[in-house]
Amino acid sequence: METTSLSLPNRPHRLWRRVLWIWGAFWVLMFLIGAQEYLWTGGKQLWNPVVEYGIAALVSTALAVVQVRRSLRCDHLLGQPARWFLRMWAWMPLQVVAFIAAIRGLRLVFYALAGLPLHPALQVESLPYEAIKFSLFYALLGGIQFGVHSYRAWATERLRAEQQARLAQQAQLAQLTQQLQPHFLFNALNTVSSLIHTDPDQADALLTHLGSLLRAATDASQKPEQSLDEEMALLRAYADIMAQRFGDRVRIAWEVDAGAGHCRVPTLGLQALLENCFRHVVEKRRAPTHIVVRAAHHAGMLRVEIEDDGDLQVLPARRGVGLGNLERRLASLHGAGARLTLRLRPGGGLLAGVELPCAH
C-alpha cells in the first residue's frame, strides 16, 4: 500500500511571513508616533527619532530572533500554557539588562561617532521607562509566539490525523476488495462445476472466460476504484459466464451512457448487483428472466441500475455478502455522497441501483 510522508503544511510559514509584515508595520507606526511627539515638543532634527527607533527596532528584532529559536525547544509544553510562558520568561530579568545595555551602547557609539552631545534618553531617570517598554514588548512577543506555535502544532496534528484516516480508509478498501476475490471465485467455480459432467464443452468454454476474467480482476483488485468502462468490461465477462450457464433462461440488455465511461466506481462493485439477480432470481425460476443494465451520468452524479423482471414482491430484510460489501465500500469512499438502493419493480422484480459522485 502506498503511504504518504508527513510534512508540515505551508500555512504556518505563510503565517510567519504575515507576522514579519506586521512586525515591520509596528515599527513604522512606532516611528511615526515618536516623530510626531518629537516635533510637537519642539524638536527640529527629524533624524533624531529615526536613530532612536531604528536602534530600538534593530535590538528588538535581534531579541525576537533569539526568542523564536528558544521557543522551538518548548513546543512540548504548548498543552500547558502556564509552564510554557514560565519557561519562556525565565530569562526576562537578564534580557532586560541586555536589552537596555544594547540600546544605550549603540546610542553612545552613534553619538560619539557623530560628535553629538548625549541625548536626554540616556539619562538614568529613563531606565524604569525603558524597562516597562521592554516588558510590554516581551509579553506581546511571547503571546504572538505562543499563538503561532500552537497553530503550527494544531495544523501538524490535523494533518497527521487526516493521513491516518486516509491510510485506514485505503486499508479498509483493500480488505473489502480482496474479500470479493474468494467470494467471486467460489460462485464462478460453482457455475463451472454444475456443468462439468453434463456439458464438458460448455464447462471448458466457461473456464476460458473465467481465466480471462480472473486475470483482469486480479489486476483490478490492486486499486479500490476504476473507470466505469473498465468495470463494465469485467461485468460483461461475468455476464457471459452466467449467460452460458443458464442459456435461454436469461437475456441481458445493456443501456450504458457512453459519456459516463470516465466516472470511477468501486472495483468489482457492480458485479454484486448483477450477481444478486442471478442468485436470487434466475437460479430460482424456470421462466425466462430479462435483465437490463443501465448507467447514466447527469449533473455530476453517476447512476447505475440493474433491473430484473422476476417474481420478487417484498424487499429483502437484509443485504447479502456482495451488496453489504458494496454498501460499506461506497460509504468508505464517498460517505453520504453515495448510496445503494433497492426498489420493487412495478409488476414484480427488483431495481438495484448505485448512485455516486462522478469523478475523473
Image (cartoon, rainbow, N blue to C red):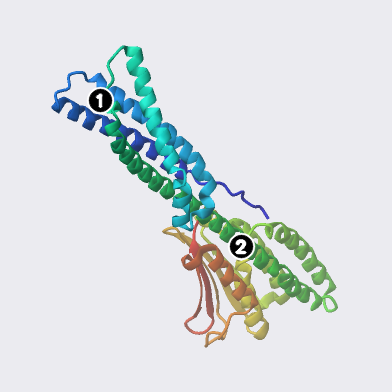
Q: Residue 346 at what x, y percent from top left?
A: 47, 82
Residue 131, quarter of picture: top left
Tag 1's secondary structure?
A: helix
Q: Residue at x 43, y 38 (%)?
A: 95
Given this view, does label 2 or label 1 mark the residue nearer the observer? 1
Q: Is 71 on the left or on the right of 206, as rendered?
A: left
Q: Check disc 1 and give the amino acid type.
A: Pro
Q: Distance between the Cα atoms at labels 2 and 1?
A: 68 Å
Q: Is 204 on the left or on the right of 360, as rendered?
A: right
Which numbered circle lies on residue 120? 1
Residue denoted by label 2 = 168
Q: Residue 308 at what x, y percent from top left?
A: 56, 77
Q: Check disc 2 and give the amino acid type.
A: Ala
Q: Are marks 2 and 1 in contact (CB under 8 Å)?
A: no
The quadrant the N terminus occupies is bottom right
Q: Is residue 251 visible?
A: no
Mark 2 vs 1, N-terminal side? 1
Residue 252 sits above or below residue 171 on the image: below
Which numbered circle lies on residue 274? none
Dot 1 crowding, Cα within 10 Å, few <14, some 14–19, many 20+: few
